[in-house]
Amino acid sequence: MSELHYALIAAAVLLLLVLFGWSKWQERRQLGRANREGGTGEAVPPKSAPAPGGRIEPRLGDPPGDGAPDLAAPAMEPGARPQPPRWTEDPMLSCVLELRCAHPADGVAVIDAVAPLQRLDCGLPVHVVAWDARAEQWVVPDRFGFYGELLAAIQLANRSTRLGDIEASRFIAAVQQVALTLDADFDPPEMALLRQRAERLEALVEQFDVQIGLTVQSADGVLNPVEVHKAVQAIGLQPGGENRWLRPGDDGAPLHAARVTPEHRLLLELDVPVVSPALRPLQAMYAAAAELAVLLNARVVDDHGRPIAPGSIEALEPALQGLYAKMRAADIEPGSERARRLFS
């Protein structure tokens, strides 16, 4: 055979080797994906059957002691993801980026990689969770786990601030660094779209950020601090800081607050969007103010020092119900977790 024949044979052999190597790489990649989804290298069924428009994944909860699924758990809506304690994925509130690792990373590597991201100071909450294939739920990474998928989220706005271009760029850059460290890929968001979402959320916050205050003013002009402490304890208010107290509601969240002002008045405040209307918070706050006025030989007045009668409180109810209706129309239930995160 001529040199040309030998060259052609060598080229053919080389091509076969390349194709063989490519097939092996694809096989390892599929095996890694199976590990992430099922916690084993064997073929496993999907976590759940996908529904149109989204995916269904197991309900969050402490896994049963024997590792069996919680059959008593209610079914989740299509597309919903189970959430770890103290954080709920909310597409309205947050920018959530999904990181997909080429190979499962051990917990120590994940914790080290995400530490700078969690310390990021953007003025808004940042959360990182990982998919635990064995427990089949999203969890806060720990050093004993192996994780192939992460979620990194930052809230877009709250009553104090909103996500600006600089903060968004820092967050995305930090997520990108995590991806490089863990050999993961993710789809960065479009900055213009992210800016629009943050601005819309900020506008909603400004529209519904309403507080109502009642002042307990002493007939002598100045309240006695010792008597104030005795009075707030007598009606069941709990300490919430220096010269500040909270009235817990039936759900455990604060119903209203009370604090001593620099003018030595006692100010009761209702943070309207974060309290459930079912608790009748305005009436509860006025009742507390009336009790305190009796105990302190004082009277309940408005910002201008004019006495407030019970009828004046009832006159505010239609405006309050109108605000609640607008919040619900914007998909923000007053007193819900979403509302509390927005108005924190």
Image (tube, rainbow, N blue to C red):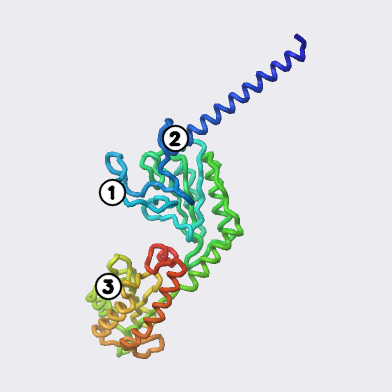
Q: Mark 1 points at which residue?
A: 72
Of 270 and 102, nearer the camera is: 102
| Image coords of residue 18 (percent x, y) | 63, 25
Q: Mark 2 points at which residue?
A: 35
Mark before the other along the chain sequence, 1 or 3: 1
Point out residue 6 in the picture as x, y percentages from the top left corner: 73, 13
C-alpha span from label 2 to label 3: 53 Å
Q: Answer few, some or many: residues within 10 Å of disc 2's Cα (few below 14, many 20 plus, some between 14 and 19).
A: many
Q: Which residue lies furthest to the front in this view?
A: 52
Q: Which residue is drawn at 58% across and 25% down?
A: 21
Residue occupying the point 33% across, 69% down: 254
In the rendered view, does 213 fall on the left or right side of 293? right
Residue found farthest to the left: 234
Q: Are marks 1 and 3 in contact (CB under 8 Å)?
A: no
Q: CA gap, disc 1 to disc 3?
A: 38 Å
Q: Which residue is nearer to you in this view: 206 or 182?
A: 206
Q: In which quarter of the image is residue 169?
A: bottom right
Q: How crowded is mark 3: few (under 14 residues within 10 Å), some or many (20 or more)?
A: many
- N-terminal of the two: label 2 or label 3? 2
| Circle 2: residue type | Asn
Question: In front of the other: label 1 or label 3?
Answer: 1
Secondary structure of residue under mark 1: loop
Q: Which mark lies nearer to you, 1 or 2?
A: 1
SS type, badge 3: loop
Look at mark 3 in the image and give the residue it sits on: 237
Quarter of the view holding residue 245: bottom left
Q: How far apart are marks 1 and 2 (CA)?
A: 27 Å
Mark 2, mark 3: which one is toward the viewer? 2
Q: Percent from the top left, x then y, of residue 195?
A: 58, 61
Q: Quadrant location of the C terminus?
A: bottom left
Residue type indicated by callout 3? Leu
